[in-house]
């Protein structure tokens, strides 16, 4: 089991930077007061600071859930519009009959729409968790052999690939899927959590006497940066969820 398991939750890259920067400030303040940390704790602190710099060096802006939701919704709507455009391009065949290739192209568009977007795109107005249920169904439909073949014939593989990537990012941000471990940003954030988890272990091992005011102070100085950042992210998530719920209640589902 990795040391990150001792942390209550994963922070975003931005949260890692905030917590690591605050930890460095606390350490500097302790040094200014001539407080010397235990060697293993000092090493753990230095590791977190180094990992924080690594995360910051990646220049991650960490898009918010609202931004990811907006981008995903636009991609879904654009894909639906493409299918709709193909169907309409070959409409009114009772007046102007379709050729064999034209009929096949329209049939492919109808197939993809019926399997992937059978209920339209109104679900993009739902709250995040409910949207994800529908997106997950879309992913499964896109994995179907007939749908894959139809998408390929329609020349929409690039659009579907981007749609998959948006939905994967959506799931990652929502916390229901995992990012690819090969991603440098993911590796840096994972390393940061391992480092801070190790600090948690060392801080409790060295300063576990609740009756000792100095121990309690040091634990607070060392661990509160992470705890504060985690709580701030919880508050932000609750606020976004409340806002999305309010919007969903005020906007009729299309």
Image (cartoon, rainbow, N blue to C red):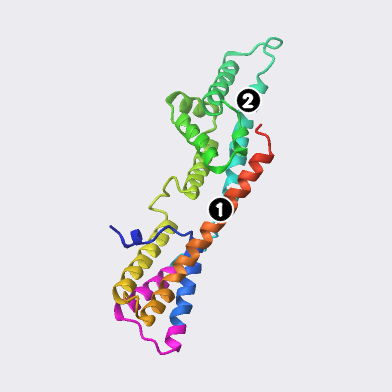
Considering the image in quadrants, where does the C terminus appear? top right
In front of the other: 223 or 16: 223
- According to the image, label 1 marks what residue? 238
- Name the residue at 53% across, 38% down: 130
On the question of residue 111 being in view, the answer is yes
| Magenta span includes 177 | no
Query: Distance of mark 1 from mark 2, alpha carbons?
Result: 41 Å
Q: Where, by quadrant of the figure, is residue 185 drawn?
A: bottom left
The mark found on residue 115 in the picture is none
* Relative to 165, residue 229 above or below: below
Give residue 241's position: percent from left, percent from top. Answer: 57, 48
- According to the image, label 2 marks what residue? 86
- Disc 2 crowd rating (10 Å Cα; few below 14, some 14-19, many 20+) is some
On the question of residue 53 being in view, the answer is no
Q: Is residue 216 left or right of residue 132?
A: left
Q: Secondary structure at mark 1?
A: helix
Extent of the magenta region: 29-53
Q: Is residue 111 left or right of residue 52?
A: right
In front of the other: 40 or 89: 40
Identify the main secondary structure in magenta: helix
Give residue 126's position: percent from left, percent from top. Answer: 59, 38
- Name the residue at 48% across, 78% down: 25
């Amino acid at each position: 089991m990795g040391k990150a398991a001792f942390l209550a939750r994963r922070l975003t890259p931005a949260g890692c930077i905030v917590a690591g920067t605050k930890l460095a400030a606390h350490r500097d303040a302790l040094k200014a007061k001539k407080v010397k940390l235990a060697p293993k704790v000092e090493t753990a602190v230095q590791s977190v600071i180094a990992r924080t710099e690594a995360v910051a060096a990646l220049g991650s802006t960490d898009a918010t859930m609202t931004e990811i939701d907006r981008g995903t919704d636009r991609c879904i709507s654009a894909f639906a519009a493409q299918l709709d455009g193909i169907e309409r391009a070959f409409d009114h065949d009772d007046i102007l009959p379709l050729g064999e290739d034209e009929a096949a192209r329209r049939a492919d568009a109808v197939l993809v729409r019926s399997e992937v977007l059978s209920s339209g795109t109104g679900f993009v107005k739902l709250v995040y968790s409910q949207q994800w249920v529908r997106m997950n169904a879309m992913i499964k439909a896109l994995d179907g052999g007939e749908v894959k073949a139809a998408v390929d014939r329609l020349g929409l593989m690039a659009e579907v690939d981007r749609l998959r990537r948006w939905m994967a990012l959506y799931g990652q941000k929502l916390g229901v899927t995992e990012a690819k471990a090969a991603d440098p940003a993911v590796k840096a954030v994972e390393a940061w959590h391992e480092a801070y988890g190790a600090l948690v272990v060392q801080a409790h091992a060295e300063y576990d006497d609740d009756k000792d005011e100095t121990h309690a102070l040091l634990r607070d100085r060392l661990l509160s940066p992470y705890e504060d950042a985690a709580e701030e992210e919880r508050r932000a998530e609750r606020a976004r969820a409340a806002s999305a719920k309010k919007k969903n209640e005020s906007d009729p589902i299309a």
